[in-house]
Amino acid sequence: MPQLLGVFEQPDHIAAAAKRLRDRGYTDMETFSPSPFPEVDDAVDEKPSGVRLFTLIGGLAGVCTGYALTLWMANDWPIMLGGKPFSSIPPYTIIAFELTILFGGLMTVLGLFLKGGLPSMKLHAAYSARFSAEDFGLVVSCRDRDVPEIDGLMREHQATEVSLVEG
Amino acid sequence: MTPPPAESVAAMIRPTPVTRDSKANRDLLRVMEGGSLGYFALVALAVGAMLAAGGVWIWQVYEGLGIAGYAHPVFWGAYIVTFVFWVGIAHAGTLISAILYLFRAKWRNAINRSAEAMTVFAVLTAAQFLGIHVGRIWKSYFILPYPNQRALWVNFKSPLLWDTFAITTYATISIVFFYVGLVPDLAIARDRATGWRKVLYTILSLGWQGTSKQWKAHNRTVLHLSGLATPLVLSVHSVVSWDFAMSIVPGWHATIFAPYFVAGAIFSGFAMVLTMMIPVRRIFALEEYITDYHFENMSRFLLLTSIIVGYAYAAEYFIAWYSQVEPEQTSFWKRAFGPYWISTWVMILCNGVFPQLLWFKKLRTNVPFLFVLSMLINVGMWFERYVIIITGLSREYDPAVWGIYTPSWPELVIVAGSFGFFCQFFLLFLKVFPVVAIAEVKELEIHAKAHGEGH
Amino acid sequence: MSEFDRREFLKIIGVGAGGAAASACSDPVEKLIPWVIQPEEITPGLPVIYASTCQECTTGCGLHVRTREARPIKLEGNPEHPVNRGALCARGQASIGRTYHPDRYRSPVERGADGSISALTWEEATAKVASAIKAAGSKVAVLGGQTGPTLSALIDSWLDAVGGGTRVVYEPFAREALREASTAVFGVASEPIFDLTDTDYVIDFGGDMLGTGASPVEHSRQLMGARDARRERGRAARLVYVGPRLDETASASDEWLAPKPGTEGLLALGIARVAYDAVRASGRTPAGDVDAIESVLKPFGPDSVASRTGVPAEAIRRIGSAMAAADRPVALPPGVALTSRRATATNAAVLLLDAVVGAVGRAVTIPPPSEGPVASFRDVAKLIDAMRSGDVSVLLVHDTNPIYSLPPDSGFAEALEKVGLVVSFASMPDETSERAGLVLPDHTTLETWGDASPRPGVRSLVQPTIRPIFDTQSLGDSLLAIARALGQERAAGLPSGSFRAVIESAWSDTDFRAALKRGGEFSETGASLAPGVSPGIARLEFKEPTFEGDGSFVLLPVPSPLLTDGRGANLPWLQETPDPITKIAWQSWAEVSETAAAELGVTPGDVLSIETPYGEAKVPVWPRGGIRDDVVALAIGQGHQVGRYASAAQEGAEGRVRGASVISLLPSLTDESGGRAWLAAKARVTATGSFQRLPFTQGTDNKRGRLLGESISLVALAKGESPWAPNQGAFMAAAPHGEEHGGNGDASDDHGGGHEGPHEIRRAFDPSDDSEDGDPFRWGMTIDVDKCTGCSACVVACTVENNIPMVGEEGVLRNRQMSWLRIERFVGDGYQQLQTGRPGPQNHEALGDTDVRNSPMLCQQCGAAPCEPVCPVFATYHTPSGLNGMIYNRCIGTRYCSNNCPYKVRRFNWFDYQITGWPEPMPLMLNPDVTVRGQGVMEKCTFCVQRMQAARQDAKSAGRDVPEDGAIQTACQQTCPSGAIVFGNLKDEKSRVNTVAEENAGRAYRALHVLNTRPAIQYLAKVKREEGHGTGHAAAGPVRPEKSA
């Protein structure tokens, strides 16, 4: 099934176009933007990214590991040190804190990879260097007969050009 | 009316090739191209210094730490001083990227990339010194809690272990942060590069193409990393300061240390960013992206942190007097007027007094002045750690074993080498990665453009 | 050599990234060769102990040689021996190193005319000597030190046998003057023996009896015992010291008088006269010729003596009457440093004082004249003349080093050139053996047979405890071999068999095996006489001695408490042990008063030129408060060109002299007795302008009023006022008399460092809580600062016991000495001084001030040890029995523990001392029970934990679960002559460590305890014994203003 690529110069244009197309029922679309523009991203799908969940899990895992590690190791072979208790929470909190950050951070990146579909070996057929310059791209897959309508819609929203994606 | 058949439409559409590229891309990617003679001279200098230090270090491992200037009871010397110094430097990057991000201070875009890079390199440099400092590097893995046949773990009560965890975490997180921010720019580079760079950037950019899903996840990730990095950056230097504050050494055992060290770290970090970025901006003609406005903002930070640090100095002396603990008083008296008075006054002048000049806008915007000042601050901050560590140890509780420490030349070579180590990475960075966050800068540009035309 | 491979290996591993993986197998692969036929008395792992006798000086202390696997590893005093009763001095402790010294001759050597060295077999060497002697006829001379009676007798008979010849006994520190004085005063030509047991008034006329005297170990024990006994009755055993310099004995004294050097005798007479009147007044009469006494004493009224000596008449009267009133007084004669050209008169005066106060026969015993040759400087002079005139063609030198120890103007060196063949029996090279044509190396004390008779009633044996390490032969056997090589008819006069047989026959009147077991034959009461004063005394004339040279300073050559007359200089343990007074190691220094230094415009380390008519020496200066302004003092002992450690060879400067030799500045003059006069020259002292850093180990003796090295007055003690009771005072120890700490008007001084500060944390605690509940032990110590004389025997003992390496002069210059135990020397209570700049070494002594606190500092084994929690890898931790353990294998060398140790008793291996510190064959003396530490690890005292383990094993095998109290003695405690250190189990209420502390609760304090480290060591404060029981401040000393550097 054919894919139409519309090229825009301004974020609000592409955002509007995307929104419009979604209303018309064209849900299978993808955008390319050179910089982060929330309005564009939300126009495609306003669901917030699921990365937050990864961070939460990572953080919790970290704090638990931190305390478990320290407390267990301190009591696995209790060694007297300067008359201090074997399980002394305050110092272990520091370890727990550091691990919270560490695990949380790494999990967040994992989230980025999974949610952002990274790393991906091949680029989208419609992607080209202009989208890492200043242009915005909107790719819509549709049935052949919908092509003119989409074409029209895009131009209506000041798409500088619309083309059919080969391959 | 009935729509025309698809193929006819397809026929009538002609894709037009990309002709124009964004100015930001061109300007900023240009930095990575080629390399002047001066550049390679600098690289040679940096690498040379590092190799010299490496040689001395190998000799030290062979002969023993005795080749350093240690004298009972001063068992920590220039190595730990330099360790703390570099950890401090490492603080600006994350602060700029994380905290300023959370505060939505857009001006950070121009400098955050290079600052993050410095963070990463500074942490790596600092980490070297943990190994250089210990007596038996070949046994230093003992400090890791790995399962072993002795069933012996590590002592989590020791500030040195907190250090190990904090530094590792900080290194990991700042590398991750640096890389995540880099991905979109790497894609930009990928789309324009040829040859080995093409391969490199294709791999590193992970197939980024700026789709909505990617940007959504990316924004969220940066936000969360900032959220995590902010407490981290504050914790790391606190932990480092506890290496001292947790001991009973007069002059070390002070509750003020954590905030005092964190402020000092940010202070020195910003100074180092200025020291590095002022020449870079000049050499690569980036005035358009890194403006005096940025420098002025940084110097405001310098002023603020300098005041905090100066206050800490004063507070230490006040408490020493007020506490009426004689060893404490003696220790601080010796700082100011004892054998190490030079270091102390260098520290006070460079960190407490000179930066006060930044009250004047004229000077805040005077780039050569800022460069000189940032240099002075770097010196001052190294001496701050020298004063704290050495004077503290040399005048302790038992007057019978007071001692004097003076760094030996091998120590100084290694310390100098650490600057080479740091600089070589930074020079490499200039040529391999975009020195300014292009995507973020462009965001502003496009916004401006949109604003200019629309409505 | 295997170490080298290992070292290489370690380092490469260290450098290589693969370290982690490979260093597990970084130890060298060494083959164990099992003992096929094992000697039955040796059980591997268990020490075998042999009794022997220390030959380091002529005192003759008894030894217990602790051997492991047939190797002596430690010397300890023989508890049965009446002289030292188990204790040993620093020299004795270090003397074990002679046997394992890397310099030792490996075999007999011949020195060619061109100075070339060639090794010989014993047959060749013996033959060469024999032929030379045959040729020489009676022109043979033997020059040697004091030897045991049997060997001495053998030498005499040998000389007769080989055709006559002269024999001269030469001891640099011989005491001819005393012998002569005894002849004059009592008509008995022998050296009196002074016994301080239960004395209550001792006056030492410059003998430094506790440091370099005739029998320091014995006298320390006796004096401290007497002090204990008296103190328990709330009274004082007073020690009055007379001498120009604050030395060890002066530091331990209660009153110190510094008369003009050389006038000690006059002072003695002045005191004697006062005492005499008092004695007569009390109706007593001194034994002997009263008229002689009176005629001698008549001219010495207190006031005239005062004007002649510079000692106030008041003091003379006070001391005189006190001596007369005392129930067991004793006066001791001057030592080497004060043997002036009138030494005999001086000694006589002191003996007369003893006679007057009735000490003779009680505290002073006069042994019958000893047979056998005695050392005589006069004879040495004669011998030199003979050599010069070519009447000596073969000179045999043993047990002495005349080239070094004789003054240059004696002409010995030149005379030696005229001697055909010089044969040396030295076991390691010294200045003399370097000029000998033949060296027939002698065994060391630990390899040879021998005996000694330090005094009547005490005969003690020397027995070999190790197979000779090198191809050496004992002197006795060498002599016998030479005689036999000369042919039967000559050898006939001599005993057949080996020297061992000679010893056995000499001891045939005893149960030899029993004697060997015991270490000799000891009967408490030796034959002694109690003669009265003989009229002979009248023939002595008592007046000030004369000095050569026109300098403004009297040159005072003081014997070094460690290097003695220089014989100790090649033992690194003695070189590196800081001088007990100045805390300087490895170097010479010149002591002048601070006033004099100010006039000369010099500060510590500035090099002085000291010039006498006989020579010049350039020596860095050490200004002191504790020395007369008209005196410049130089320690004897340094200034060798020969010897790995004695010379600067250690610093890589082969043949360069280490320090300076005071002997080269001295004339070879004698006193009336023909004894050598040391105190005979005046020196011109000038600043050279050059500077030399002095390797001192303690920069200041100001303890700043901190809770270290405390003292308390006898009065306060009697009243039960203890400033260290828990919950009193603040950081500073409250001043014993409640007097304010001296201030120098500095802001912070006004606050007295926080007396009664609100932050008080010094709480009472029970140290026995600081070990695991189930554990029967909590090891602890009680150290009596009042008893510590600073002699440093403990330091050397610790070094030898624990395989502690030497770091040499450079090491000490960086304070890198490794010693686990140091003796801190503080003067007065000290006070805060906040001076600016880089402080030079400081000195707060004052003439007449004896408030010196010597406080041994070692790991306090804290209950709440600051060093423990900061170690990331558990390398240091708290053992179940309360020790602060140190695991070398685990240490990665972060050195945080040392930073956090307030006592600074941890040491770090900056270099690979375990390789560089122990040249062959020194590794043989390593204690196998103690790990040898490698490069990059921290080390520290653990109360000789290896000894605890051994004792616990013994207890187990004896069926007890805990060793009884006293079974475990730490090395330092074991050797302490004055018994200042008590070690034991704090959990056992009846253990001495507890009882001693309880008995002295009023003096007990814990070092720096304000830090709440819960130390396991309790110190007992020094006691100030004021005259008349503390009404005055005789010993307290003034609060001195700060002398800022």
Image: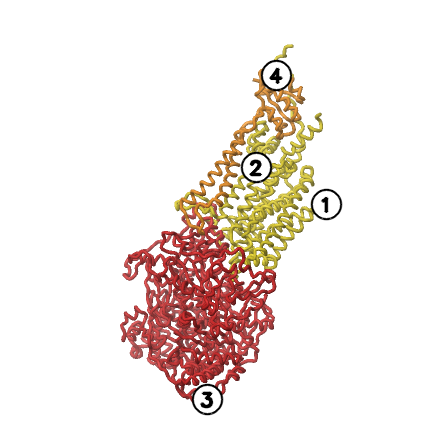
Mark 4 vs 2: CB contact within 8 A: no
Instruction: Give the colour in which the image draws chain C.
Output: red
Mark 4 vs 1: CB contact within 8 A: no
Residue C445: x, y in percent? 37, 69
- The residue type indicated by label 3 comes to Ser
Name the subunit of mark 1: B
Query: Element type at marker 4?
Result: helix
Query: Mark 4 or mark 2, which is nearer to you?
Result: 2
- The residue type indicated by label 2 comes to Gly
Work out how far the residue at label 4 is from the one at label 1, CA to CA, in angstroms: 61 Å
Q: Nearer the viewer, residue C39 or C784?
A: C784
Residue C713 position (above or below residue C169):
above
Which mark, residue C295?
Answer: 3
Work out how far the residue at label 2 is from the one at label 3, CA to CA, in angstroms: 103 Å
Instruction: Give the colour in which the image draws chain A.
Output: orange
Q: Quadrant of the N terminus of chain B?
A: top right
Q: Which residue is drawn at 54% across and 41% down?
A: B171
Question: Mark 4 — residue?
Answer: A147
Q: In which quarter of the image is the C terminus of chain B?
A: top right
Query: Element type at marker 2?
Result: helix
Which mark, residue B227?
Answer: 2
Residue C339: x, y in percent? 47, 79
Query: Mark 4 or mark 3, which is nearer to you?
Result: 3
Name the subunit of mark 4: A
